[in-house]
Image (cartoon, rainbow, N blue to C red):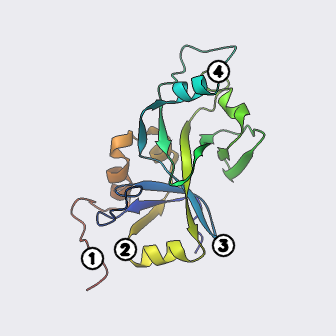
Amino acid sequence: MNLQHHILIAMPSLDDPYFARSVVYLCEHNENGAMGLVINKPIEQLSVGKILQKLKISPDTRDENQSLEKPVLVGGPVSEEHGFVLHSGDKKYAASTRLTDDLFLTTSKDVLETLGTAEQPEHYLMTLGYSSWTAGQLEREIMENSWLVADASQRLLFRTPMPDRWREAAAGIGVNIYTIAQQAGHA
């Protein structure tokens, strides 16, 4: 079972502070474990523009039509000081990993230098930190009903409003997340 390019939807009973009501995009999943980014937990009062200011990145060709007021997200509890940009497009940057035909994960400064310009990726989100599971850990958590699994879509990743992502992700697989049984599968 390879869950790369899928999303994890936290079950209502999952009360971990990082993962309660979270939606996690799985960037990598193999026999060694899994790595993902929480895509619905904004960091209060931290925007892409503020990150660029802190890093002293000021685009030479700022496009006023490109807002930098997007929230920066809590990607997970690992390496919270490191930034990750999940983005669409076909341009590779210095430290880009192709996840699908039109989806990349980039950790290099060159992608940041395009934000706010006409050269920025059409769709992107920025996180600080990531989520990680050791070999077999995620599979156990799924078997324990901590997570629902669904296919990922660019609509959910980039266009669904942040407060709606948890509910919409579950609705996409026919589940009303507010009424699902807390102990599904334990009859």
Q: Position of residue 185 (x, y in %)?
A: 31, 81
Tell me the kind of residue under disc 1: Gln
Query: Mark 2 and 4 residues: CB-CB less than 8 Å, in contact?
Result: no
Query: Which x, y percent locates residue 103?
Result: 63, 46
Above or below, comparing residue 42 to residue 136 in the picture = above
Q: Dot 3, how many residues are within 10 Å of its Cα: few (below 14), some (14-19), or many (20+)?
A: few
Could you tell me if the residues under marks 1 and 4 are in contact, i.e. CB atoms within 8 Å? no
Say which residue label 2 marks.
145
Label 4 packing within 10 angstroms: few (<14), some (14-19), many (20+):
some
- Amino acid carrying label 2: it is Asn
Residue at the image point whose x is 23% and y is 59% from the top? 178
Q: Residue at x 58, y 44 (%)?
A: 81
- Could you tell me if the residues under marks 1 and 3 are in contact, i.e. CB atoms within 8 Å? no
Q: Which residue is labeled 3 in the image?
A: 32
Distance CA(mark 4)–CA(mark 3)? 39 Å
Occupied quadrant, residue 18: bottom left
Who comes first in sequence, dot 4 or dot 3?
3
Q: Earlier in the sequence, mark 3 or mark 2?
A: 3
Amino acid beneath label 3: Asn
The nearer-to-camera label among 4 and 3 is: 3
* Mark 2 → mark 4, Cα distance in angstroms: 43 Å
Q: Is residue 117 visible in this depiction of the protein?
A: yes
CB atoms of marks 2 and 1 within 8 Å: yes
Which residue matches tag 1? 183
Q: Nearer the viewer, mark 3 or mark 2?
A: 3
Q: Please name which of the two marks, 1 or 3, marks the residue nearer to the observer.
A: 3
Disc with the residue nearer the chain's start (2 vs 4) = 4
Mark 1–mark 3 distance (CA, rounded to whole Å): 28 Å
Q: Which residue is mark 4?
A: 118
